[in-house]
Amino acid sequence: MATVDVATGIRSRIEVRDLDMRYGDRVIQRDLNFAVEPEDIFVIMGPSGSGKSTLLRHMIGLVPPARGDVYYDHTSFWTADAQGRQRILRRVGVLYQEGALWSSMTLAENIGLVVEEFTDLPPATIREVASLKLALVGLAGFEDFYPSEISGGMRKRAGLARAMALDPDILFFDEPSSGLDPITSRRLDDLILELRDSLGATVVLVTHELASIFAIGTNSIFLDDETKTITAAGNPTKLLHECRDPKVRRFLTRGGKDGS
Amino acid sequence: MDDEVNVSWGAVDDATAGARHVAIDHTERGALRLRLSGRWTLGAPAPAAADVFEYARVSDTRVVVDGGRNLQWDSGLLIFLRDVLGEAERRQMHVDFVGLSEGARRLLALASATPEAKERPGGDRPSMLGRVGSSAIATARSAVEVLAFIGEACVGVLRLLTGRARFQRSELLLVVQEVGAQALPIVSLITFLVGVILAYVGAVQLRAFGAQAYVADLVSVAMTREMGAMMTAVVMAGRTGAAFAAQLGTMRVNEEIDALTTFGIPPMEFLVLPRMIALAVMMPLLCLYADLLGMLGGAAVGVGLLHLGGLEYYQRSLQAITLDDFAAGLIKASVFGVLVAIAGCLRGMQSGRTSAAVGAAATSAVVTGIVLIIVSDALMTVLFDVLHL
């Protein structure tokens, strides 16, 4: 009987090679090359409309790239067949922008559905798994609430609980702090750090929230909406002090210092 | 101090009553001086900068706008000054502001700041030919999407038949309730009235031959073979097809469908299959009910207005129709059910990620659904005739 994996401590590496992203004829970004090392908190940053979320959607298999590929531990994602991709995605958890909870199901059912799909656990155990995951994100006791009955911040945390349902070793976050007040958003940052440390997970984060970027980011890339490629890469705090690119500096200082 | 010209808009002598006034002179060499006074507010007659520049000399290189501290102003002044700035730029003249209030200057500076780069996705408005071309390409692409969707739906049905399809039974039951019991009131109303209409139309024609009694035949055959299934399907396309498209479209907007995909749960099986099954199963039942109510509507007219005997009407109806007629209607109903579900789900899954797109998806689902119903009905009617069904 299959079981839910406990944190196995698998260290996962993601590599993006020569990736081009397009919508029809319009180039979003081109020649993207970067690697996310195990246990990184990797930030994809850039101005609105630069294609951050689109890049994430390419990495989790929702949009096929115009060119290039994404490698999970040296295994190509986009040349793999449907089953191979599913095997890779099985190790991945995604927190979507608004949580993307299935609105016709309660929080416990949302998590339960995922567990049920991939394991043969009996319903009582599945329910316990759901309760545990909800407790991890501070939502103990909300098992039977529908997504429409809880606040936006809680929906995001519930989405995170669902993303962790299968104990993934890679977690993707799409704009986790958008629409949250500073304190809630800070708590979410702490939670991300805590999960990374306790699960040994690799985290990829799409955000333009400077506070989060500096607080938890260990590595980053900056997508430029004009040159349409990566113009800076490295630890965000280091970039703040060392990066010469005026646009990156303006971004990291909220337009404060021009870099001149 | 040579040529001073006074230009006024509104009442010239009555500055307090709302006149705008510009005095134009050339006190300095090469400078066109505009002295503004009066009330420069919105709603007062508006001067055009081009009129003022009529007075400029060829040798002028500068414009001096003298506002005066006591000028009454609002956006009306700013509109005029922006106009002046634009005109001056065209004539390659430099503009100086003298004595204009600090607030007005700042607002003007804000308004003249370089705007964001304008880059619309897709670029400029294409030519007529370009639009025809791109809409042809879009149609071809959507045809591929439709085919892919139908293909996936077929694979889903196959997986269902082999017992490998994954969807929640509770979801199926919920949809069954939505498209079954909850649709009864509207189906009752519509089909009863269709029966009434058929009886009326038939009675008027048959009366000419003194064959009013045949109204019963007409209504029962028409309802069972044709109108029961078709009217139910049209009601369901409007009621349920639109609802499916809106539900799935909203799930697309909320990234719920993406979430299913990344968890390896095929949306086709999880969302579309239960809806298709529910409609394919419930439509024949609804159709049977519709047949009965339509005949009741016909009987109401026959007995109430044409004074046919109730029992006579009943027996004529029984003689007129056979099980084949019912079968033809029920087969049609089942096909319509699947088509309505496919139209609704397809448009919902194709929906864009904005609220407007969800609305468009719902509308398009109804249109697609009704077109599919009528076209397939025509095909099946011919087919049944060939098969003598």
Image: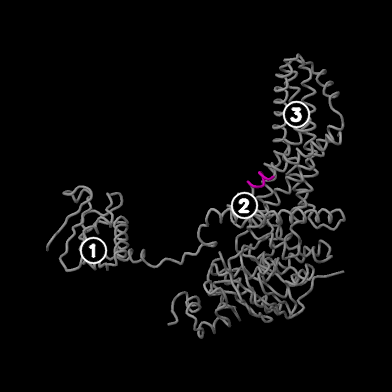
Residue occupying the far bottom of the picture: A242
Indicate yes or no whether the magenta region holds residue A18.
no
Residue at mark 1: chain:
B
User: Percent position (x, y) of residue B24?
Assistant: 19, 59
Residue occupying the far front of the picture: B129
Q: Nearer the viewer, mark 1 or mark 3?
A: 1
Q: Which quadrant holds residue B379? A: top right
Q: Secondary structure at mark 2?
A: helix
Have a look at marks 1 and 3 and say if they share a chain.
yes
Image coloring type: one colour
Separation (CA) of disc 2 from disc 3: 35 Å
Have a look at marks 2 and 3 and say if they share a chain.
yes
User: Percent position (x, y) of residue B384?
Assistant: 83, 36
Separation (CA) of disc 2 from disc 1: 53 Å
Quarter of the rendering occupied by the C terminus of chain A: bottom left
A148 relative to B88 in the view: left or right = right
Residue ID for mark 2: B358
B62 relative to B251 in the view: left or right = left
Q: Secondary structure at mark 1?
A: strand
Q: Which residues are magenta?
A: B363-368
Of the residues shown, which amino acid type is indicated by label 1?
A: Val
Residue at mark 2: chain:
B
Which mark is on residue B65?
A: 1
Main secondary-structure element of the magenta-colored stretch:
helix
Which mark is on residue B92?
A: none
The tag earlier along the polypeptide, 2 or 3, is 3
